Image (cartoon, rainbow, N blue to C red):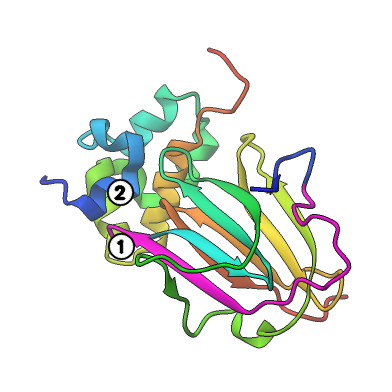
Amino acid sequence: MIATMNASNPDILPERDAPFRLRGVYETKTDGCRDELVLDLDGASLTFKADPDTDAIDAFCTDGDFHPSGGQKPLADSPFDPFAGAELGWTWLATNQQGYCDSALLSFNGIVPNLMVHVIGSAIRVFAIAPGGI
Amino acid sequence: MALTPSIARKLGSLAADAERNVAEMIRERGGSAANVRQAGPWAWFTLAEAAAAAVAGDATAETAIKIVKQARRLGEQY
């Protein structure tokens, strides 16, 4: 593990010259709940984990090529699909009014967030953020 | 109500209180009347019933469970 996301360090990607391109997304399910999501980022991986006791999210970046284990399956037909091969740009963490960090925002090919990774019901959900705005 | 592994997973550590009422659990954990309202009709069901509905895909039940889990504000003692 090379970096852990927390309130004082919402940018979990380490400095490097090569872009962090999205090469794949893998999920792990436990008793029907997606409790882990791993982004394969060309020589690094970004892992999100759901805490079933609090519905908080944990995130950390690991250096090195990602090799999925038996329980990690490719995530199909997801909001990540349009960003295959795109460069992961900035990352954000969101802490809710109750004090729980339960969401992360990700931008691809830019610095405006495209996706929200959110924990509810012991499971990780991914939402696309509509482009545009006022 | 029997707790299947999927229902227990939805509840996390709340599984020990699965037969208790959602609203009662919210208030016991320091949640407000607004939190109870946010739990919607599931406030008057047990955690196990709400979790079973969440497993079946009911997003409002899932929301109610999350409100219970996070009713206790981090950093607060009461």
Q: Residue furthest top?
A: B78
Identify which residue, A17 or A5, lies in the foreground: A17
Kindly identify which numbered label has been placed on residue A32: 1
Range of residues picked out in magenta: A10-33
Where disc 1 sits, the SS reads loop
Kindly indicate whether the residues beneath marks 2 and 1 are on one polypeptide chain.
no
Identify which residue, A126 or A16, lies in the foreground: A16
**Residue B43 horizontal/vertical position (percent):** 36, 43
Q: Is residue A53 magenta?
A: no
**Chain for mark 2?**
B
Kindly identify which numbered label has been placed on residue A96: none
Identify which residue, A30 or A121, lies in the foreground: A30
Q: What amino acid is at disc 1? A: Gly
Where disc 2 sits, the SS reads helix
The residue located at (26%, 37%) in the rendering is B15
Main SS type for the magenta part?
loop
Kindly indicate whether the residue at mark 1 contacts the one at mark 2 (C-beta within 8 angstroms): yes
**Residue A47 horizontal/vertical position (percent):** 58, 57
Q: What amino acid is at disc 2? A: Arg
Q: Is residue B26 above or below residue A1?
A: above
* Other residues around mark 1 within 10 Å, as few (<14) / some (14–19) / many (≥20): some
**Residue B46 falls in which quadrant of the image?**
top left
Identify which residue, A17 or B29, lies in the foreground: A17
The residue located at (25%, 55%) in the rendering is B6
Q: Would you say A40 lies left or right of A123 here?
A: right
* Other residues around mark 2 within 10 Å, as few (<14) / some (14–19) / many (≥20): many
The residue located at (32%, 58%) in the rendering is B54
Kindly identify which numbered label has been placed on residue B9: 2
**Residue A123 horizontal/vertical position (percent):** 43, 57
Q: Residue furthest front?
A: A64
Separation of marks 2 and 1 at Cα, in angstroms? 8 Å
